[in-house]
Image (cartoon, grey):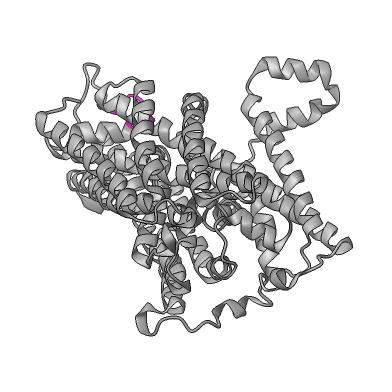
Amino acid sequence: MNITQLDLIVIIVYLVAIVTVGCLAGYFHRKGTEGKSYFLAGRSLTWPVIGLALFSTNISTVHLVSLAQEGYNNGLAYGNFEWMAAFTLIVLGLFFAPFYLRANVATLPDFLEKRYSRPCRDWLAILSIISAVFIHIGFSLYAGAVVLQGLFHINIYVSIISIALLTGLYTIIGGLLAVVLTESIQTVILVIGALFVTGFAYYHVGGWSGLKESLLSIDPDLNLLTVLRDENDKSNLPWYAVFLGYPVIGLWYWCADQTIVQRVLGAKDENHARIGPLFAGFIKILPVFIFVLPGLLCLGLVNSRFFGVDSNGLAIAPAESKDTYAFMITNLLPVGLKGLVAAALLAALMSTVSGALNSIATLFSYDIYQRWKPNATDHQLVLVGRIVTVVAMFTAICWSPLLKHFDSIFQGLNVMICYIAPPITTVFIWGIFWKRASSAAARAALYAGSSLGLIVFIIDWFKDHQKMFDWLNLHLPALQPLWRAWDHYDIPFMIMAFYLFVACSAILIIVSWFKPHQHTAESAQLVWTNPLQALQSPGWPGLANYKFLAALLFVIMVTLYIIFR
């Protein structure tokens, strides 16, 4: 990709502007040295900022790159991860957000302590930090580095370190206020950049009818244009895996993950905490059309030989499917817009990393350090949080290059989530809807579920390595049948998440039955007596009412699934 002076100016201006905004946000916020002001933006966030920040923290370079890759390989199938998110955001706005604000917690582990016990809080804090470092930051840095290497021929390690330093700078200085302000700006840039790529590709392929015509020769049934597939589809994402497995990982990600939910914890009041996630749910309609569809449009353009043919008479196409997005930027966009889309890629990367870093600082300061030093001042908590931010970033930099192990970045991301999410989803769901769910049961589900998830992850990671297989044969011969069965049957990773959730739920129910929870006055208030109780709050009047917006979002999503089934 040839970078013109105009493209470079766009990129440099963006980087300088976004880092400056982030740093100034912390500098001018007079209470920036106080704990909850630094970590929760003084609980001053309104619904538009919350919604944009939720979307921006979720959408990273992983999505722009990998969803285009999945679109090129599998059509719209992986759009399920975007549209199913809207349903879990409804759950966050209706059922979880009110409890979090009423409990007046700074972190989700804090909430878990009030509902269950201190050991549950400690375990969730550790799991949340691990997931933030290895999932949110690690995958984002790696995906961003891959794209920047493909576009600008920048060394992958230079890219990782440079972006990490720039993002860490304003995150450390400004705290959550800097994060959400920069995320709001980055969301706009990200969407504009993605719209340009989609628009140019859609125009050149000849619109929807042109795309269909181009795909007919390779996909006579036009299955690539559907989101729900059967079990024999090459995407390895059958419809039943979506409806059984996604709620498990989605409820963890959107309702019980500190990195995401921290924006809700900083809400001005309960109405803003409810409407913010619903607003994000409406925005989540877009990614299928601006992130997944471009990959499919690229396939249509390649199939119609829009990019020309090589010396062998073959259609010019991305060298590898992971290069799909970079290939489209290079071959479709004019000078200047290339710089804007490159800035959008950086925006997506930096927003996710900054959000995760702030959450790690919050978790460690409030859930680990403050336990050791209960009398720690706000200044000490912020200082510790900043130090932990540096350590977390260094760890993620070391981990991210190892992610080339996965065939697809997006699939690798969700595979790891499937091993972490089930026990956390279990204790949160049963905790707020079943009064009998006990502390002992929650601990058992967390410990056992996390152990099972780790075992499955290790087996999955090494299953193609003959040395590991030989070691098992020698030292653990009793496990040979299990190992061979695992190697023979290709279980969809989403179904694995559902299996782990069922196992964790069984553990929690059984233990709770024999050891019911001894509620305190506080914990008794953190369980809905029935789901309809969550809807008793009147909310804002008119079209801004959270009940109306939740119903509208639900109807729109069901309609989209019917159209693209």
The residue lying toward the viewer, choosing from 287 and 100, is 100
> From the viewer's perspective, is residue 16 above or below residue 481?
below
- The residue depicted at 16 percent of the width and 27 percent of the height is 3
Which residues lie in the magenta part?
Answer: 316-323
> From the viewer's perspective, is residue 411 above or below residue 101?
above
The residue lying toward the viewer, choosing from 308 and 445, is 445
Most prominent secondary structure in the magenta stretch? Answer: loop
> From the viewer's perspective, is residue 548 above or below residue 465?
below
Image location (x, y in percent) of residue 251: 57, 57
Image location (x, y in percent) of residue 93: 50, 68
Image location (x, y in percent) of residue 556: 40, 69
Image location (x, y in percent) of residue 409: 46, 34
Q: Quadrant of residue 142?
A: top left
In which quadrant will I find the N terminus? top left
**Residue 192 lies in the magenta-colored region:** no
The residue lying toward the viewer, choosing from 184 and 471, is 184
- The residue depicted at 70 percent of the width and 19 percent of the height is 468
In which quadrant will I find the C terminus? bottom left
| Res. 418 in view | yes
> From the viewer's perspective, is residue 378 above or below residue 274?
above
Q: In this view, does 444 lie to the left or right of 459?
A: right
- The residue depicted at 51 percent of the width and 34 percent of the height is 392
| Res. 562 in view | no
Q: In this view, does 555 lie to the left or right of 365?
A: left
